[in-house]
Image: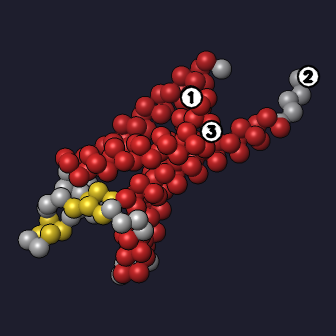
Amino acid sequence: MRHQKLIFTSLFLCYLILLFYVTLFAWNYGASLGPTGPGGRNYNVIPFRSIYRIAVFSPQLADPIRILLGNIVLFIPLGFLLPAIWIKAQRLATIILVGFSVSLLIEVSQFLFTQRVANVDDVILNTLGASIGLFIFSIIRWTKSRIVYLHT
């Protein structure tokens, strides 16, 4: 049991490093494009505005899928791994608070330190992703508790 917790803790730390690398340092997909070209800080604080714009105005169907689902999928590991190492994170309210807080930290950091768009819709989608991760964790835990092991 102790080895499992060590493995999940290691995976969680690796996930956090990758999460912050991807959201703050990796490619600049979605960079702010001002009137003079790339650059400049930008933000969206109106919920669902960019989700609507991406869904309606994207020239290809793959763009909204990649952008919107990408924000959800990015936070599923948070909702799955954190409850495996911290029992309080097995509650939905806790995982929502943690997912929201981590996402908000990333968005504020993007606004302050990068040339990306800080977006409230990303916070909403990331928090949903963390909640889905907890749901997956809960299903696996429930299924595992129902398995009968036969010792011969």
- Quarter of the image where one finds residue 93: top right
**Residue 25, image x, y percentages:** 25, 46
User: Badge 3, how many Cα within 10 Å: few under 14, some, many 20+?
Assistant: few
What residue is drawn where x is 20% and y is 48%? 112
SS for callout 1 = loop
Q: How far is mark 2 from mark 3, CA to CA?
A: 37 Å
Q: Does the rendering let one see residue 76? A: no
**Viewer-side residue, 31 vs 14:** 31
Amino acid type of disc 2?
Thr
What residue does disc 3 label? Answer: 91
What residue does disc 1 label? Answer: 86
Tell me: residue 43, above or below residue 100.
below
Drawn side of residue 131 relative to residue 109, left or right: right
**Residue 94, image x, y percentages:** 55, 39
What residue does disc 2 label? Answer: 152
SS for callout 2 = loop
Q: Which residue is situated farthest in the front direction here? A: 46
**Residue 124, image x, y percentages:** 45, 57
Drawn side of residue 39 relative to residue 99, left or right: left
